[in-house]
Amino acid sequence: MAQVEIWHNPRCSKSRQALSILDELGTPKDVVKYLEEHPSKEQITKVFKMLGYKTPRDMMRTKEDIYKELNLKEEMDDEKLIEAMAEHPKLIERPIIIKGDKAIIARPPEKAKEFLDS
């Protein structure tokens, strides 16, 4: 099985569940605690493209207070949304699992197994 990377928040139950699934499967992985090791704009852009979403907003936690404080609901510039995630990684939805040139947000966590089996 190919090496995978998981953008993980240990305080998030869904992220812990996804990581547990990777462990159960014996999946070799790099665990990126993205709230500690902030991803760059370039990394976020790359993952956004791997996710195949239409807008970066689709990979954002839109219910976070910082999302409202920054008035991101009104922001239509993709670059500015990516910048906001780079500056405030709490805005990045989790967990993100990356394998090869594809990525998913493992919500629900069971999506991790389906993704790795594909």
Image (cartoon, rainbow, N blue to C red):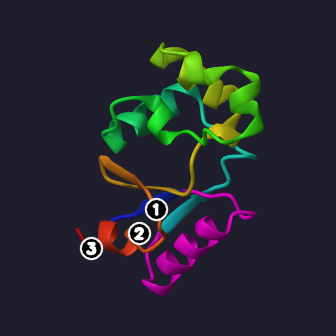
Q: Earlier in the sequence, mark 1 or mark 3?
A: 1
Q: Residue 113: image x %, image y %? A: 37, 75
Q: Which residues are magenta?
A: 7-28
Q: Three-letter amino acid code at disc 3?
A: Asp
Queried whether the magenta region covers residue 87, the answer comes back as no
Q: Quadrant of the C terminus?
A: bottom left
**Amino acid type assigned to the residue bearing label 1 in the image:** Ala
Q: How far is disc 1 from disc 3 in space, using C-alphas?
A: 13 Å
Write down the residue under mark 2.
112
Residue 49 visible, this angle:
yes
Which of 32 and 10 lies nearest the eye of the viewer? 10
17 falls in the magenta region:
yes
Indicate the position of residue 92 as horizontal and vertical percent values.
Answer: 60, 42
Marks 2 and 3, how far apart at CA: 9 Å
Image vertical order of residue 74 relative to residue 55, above or below: above
Residue 117's disc number: 3
Give the mark nearest the N terminus, 2 or 3: 2
Front-most of residues 32 and 59: 59
Location of residue 105 in the rendering, given as x and y in whole percent from the top left corner: 45, 54
Query: Quick check: marks 1 and 3 in contact, CB under 8 Å?
Result: no
Asked if the residues shown at circle 2 and circle 3 are in contact, with their CB atoms under 8 angstroms apart, the answer is no
- The answer to whether residue 10 is left or right of residue 83 is right
* Residue depicted at x 64% and y 24%: 84
Residue at horizontal 39 percent and vertical 68 percent from the top: 111
Label of residue 106 in the image: 1
* Residue at x 50% of width, y 16% of height: 79
Q: Amino acid at mark 2?
A: Ala
Query: Which residue is drawn at the image coordinates 31% and 49% (left, top)?
Result: 102
Task: Report the label total.
Answer: 3
When the figure is inspected, residue 112 is found, relative to residue 69, above or below; the finding is: below
Depicted 17 relative to depicted 6: above or below: below
Task: Choose the circle earlier in sequence order: 1 or 2.
Answer: 1
